[in-house]
Amino acid sequence: MKTITILVPCYNEEAVLKKFYDRVQSVIEKISDYEFAYLFINDGSNDQTLEIMRQLHKLDKHVHYLALSRNFGKEIAMIAGLDRVESDAVVIMDADLQDPPELLPEMIDWWQKGYKDVCAKRRSRDGESWFKKWSSHTYYKLLQRLTNVPIQIDVGDFRLLDRQCIEALKLFRESQRYTKGMFSWIGFDKKEILFDRDARAAGQTKWNYWKLLNLAIEGITSFSMAPLRIASFLGCILSITSMIYMLIVIFKTIIFGEDVKGYPSLVSIILFIGGAQIFFLGIIGEYLGRIFNESKQRPLYLVKEFDGEIVIKQNLR
Ligand code: UDP
Ligand code: MG
């Protein structure tokens, strides 16, 4: 019998976790031929989330849980889970029931037909402001232009991954993770199925615009060197135009004599070039920061507790 693990990163999800379990349970009870297990990742919640996981683990021997030593973020929580999954496939799901478990049978169907990565693509984005829709659309168009990897649009982390993909993803040990890009990067046979994303069942979203902006920059800097290239090109253009302008000024001075006016143009040029320099330095800094972070080679996460056992020696790769 093939095994499937449902991997659920959780951060302060006490309000929905029980509901989540019940609803998934009602779906998988109808699916025979497969053995299911749960792997909940407690991403350093400061509410009763871990306690609920412990209870579920006691109740159902298919429920496993892993508690990280603090909040590391969803991207890290996911790799922590993938590192420990032993089944033939994994389905990554949000705890807040925004990813409907009713999609599981269809996903498994496609997996059986040979697809290695069955992803759920949002048909609609109800309940989101036009600004969020517009900004995310523009961002993905931009990201797509900047990188050679085909980025999937409106596809999140809700997907079924075959063992082959899991093993591939486990090779990615970068600490600043942009998992969405990694799913695209690894390739393998992908199948997108459409679904309507519901609103959060209860509790609060952990995202705000500041975090989203940071994630957006993460996406670009981890999958593309284009900003550096663009900076070089713009720098080139800037120096050529400066050179031309310089020649014009010298020429004018020689022919028409010294001209003391020109303070406004001088100031604008200095400010413009100064701004451009700082901007380009910022871009270089982004990449430098990444190098700094990755070169430390720190473990991606630390585990506090696994299925009721206190973890002392970290079993990391
Ligand atoms: N999550 C996590 N660590 C975090 C933030 C979020 O594990 O630091 C989990 C969260 O519990 C949920 C999933 O990631 O299961 C998606 O989070 P959320 O619903 O806040 O994001 P949204 O659906 O609004 O994009
Ligand atoms: Mg959500």
Image (cartoon, grey):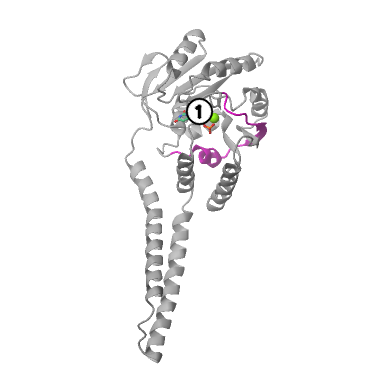
Q: Residue at x 32, y 21 (%)?
A: 313
Badge 1 element: loop
- Assign the C terminus to one quadrant of the image: top left
The residue nearer to you, when weighing 56 against 85, is 56
Q: Residue at x 60, y 37 (%)?
A: 128
Q: Which segment did they paint magenta?
A: 177-201
Q: Quadrant of residue 65?
A: top left
Ligand 1 contact, mark 1 (Cβ < 8 Å):
yes
Q: Quadrant of ligand 2?
A: top right
- Assign the N terminus to one quadrant of the image: top right
In the image, residue 109 lies at what x, y percent? 68, 26
In the image, residue 3 lies at what x, y percent? 57, 19
Please say if 214 is above or below 229.
Answer: above
- In the image, taking residue 11 as reference, residue 125 lies left or right, namely right
> Looking at the picture, which amino acid does disc 1 mark?
Gln
The residue nearer to you, when weighing 53 against 187, is 53
The residue nearer to you, when weighing 275 against 294, is 275
| Residue 1 in view | no
- In the image, taking residue 118 as reference, residue 277 lies left or right, namely left
In the image, residue 7 lies at what x, y percent? 52, 24
Task: Please tell me how many numbered marks the rendered image carries.
Answer: 1
Please say if 132 is above or below 272.
Answer: above
- In the image, taking residue 156 as reference, residue 276 lies left or right, namely left
Please say if 106 is above or below 150.
Answer: above
Q: Residue at x 47, y 24 (%)?
A: 10
Q: Which residue is mark 1?
A: 204
The residue nearer to you, when weighing 119 against 213, is 213
In the image, residue 110 lies at what x, y percent? 67, 29
**What is the crowding at mark 1: few (fewer than 14 residues within 10 Å), some, or many (at least 20)?**
few
Q: Quadrant of residue 290?
A: top left
| Residue 179 in view | yes
**Is 205 included in the stretch rendered in magenta?**
no
